[in-house]
Amino acid sequence: MVQQSSLLVNPTEHNEVDEKLRLIPQDDEDQVILDSLKMSKKDEMRRGILDSEEKSAQWGTIVVALVVGLITLAVFVFFWRRGRVSRRGICLVGLCESGKTLIFSQLIYKKAVESFTSMKENVGVLDIASKGALKLVDIPGHERVRQRFFDNYKNTARGIVFVLDSFSLNKDVRDVAEYLYTILSDPVVSSNRPKVLILCNKQDHALAKGPQVIQSILEKEMNVLRNTQTNQLEAVAEGGNRKSFYLGQEGKNFEFADIRSLRVDFAASSAQAEDLENLEKWLQSIA
């Protein structure tokens, strides 16, 4: 006879297993999840605040930079316009008997007046249609005083008109070139950059040279003069007293087009014949 065995389970052991396998109560689990969500939200808020502060700082830097830039631009425009407004002078320069004073009287008084070698300047106001007024100054051509008077007016010069006698240029070319070289190499002129017109006057003479021929003659003479001036200045500079100045482009013959700081134009005129059309157009263009 076979005996049947049965598996008996101790009720006490069964309760211990149930106790070990019992899960966290539902209420406690929900609380843990809520606490975790709260912490995540707090972290997100902190990151958001930090990001916001960083962006605010970046925008603040950009705004400050823009304000500084606008102020700088405004100051630049103010002084630039002030300089343009204050420089309303036109200097008529040239050797004696080149016709400067006759040109001055034709422009200011609309008629010819008796001219003579003067030791003082002539000053008049020239109205340019739709452009305002220009202060026209006839600088004496005498060698003793011309530099002094030019120094008085060069700071306010908007334009410089160098008048020469187209008929007698061969005789005066050396003096013309020296005076012109002095003006073009002047530090104030180079800095302020006024427009320059070389006015070939007295074109009513049958043997007068035209502007293109005169430009070629002057460039050759200025080239010789520049080499002489440069050698002299370099010799002085070696002693530490003066720095040389080179007018034009080094390594090639002198040309007016190579003066980068200045624009030099040529035009013909005949004040005696009341032919100043080219000069008047030039004045209109720079006013």
Image: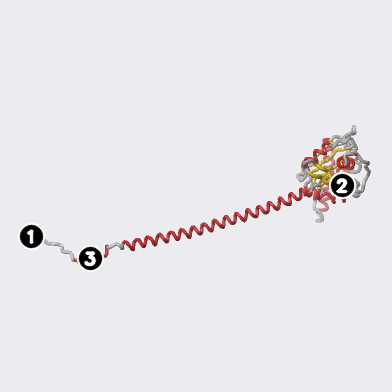
- Image vertical order of residue 187 relative to residue 9, above or below: above
Q: CA distance from mark 3 to mark 2?
A: 123 Å
Between tags 3 and 2, which lies in front?
A: 2
- Residue, disc 2: 123
Q: Earlier in the sequence, mark 2 or mark 1?
A: 1
Q: Is residue 173 visible?
A: no
| Residue 15 placement: quadrant | bottom left
Q: Residues within 10 Å of mark 2 (few under 14, many from 20)?
A: some
In this rendering, position of residue 53 left or right of residue 4: right
List x then y, in percent, for residue 67.
Answer: 64, 54
Between residue 127 and residue 121, name the one nearer to us.
127
In this rendering, position of residue 34 left or right of residue 287: left
Name the amino acid, label 1.
Val
Mark 2 element type: strand
Q: Earlier in the sequence, mark 3 or mark 1?
A: 1
List x then y, in percent, for residue 253.
Answer: 79, 41
Please give the label number shown on residue 2.
1
Between residue 255 and residue 283, name the one nearer to us.
283
Between residue 258 and residue 148, name the one nearer to us.
148
Q: CA distance from mark 2 to mark 1?
A: 149 Å
Marks 3/2 in contact by CB < 8 Å: the verdict is no
- Residue, disc 3: 15
Mark 3 element type: helix
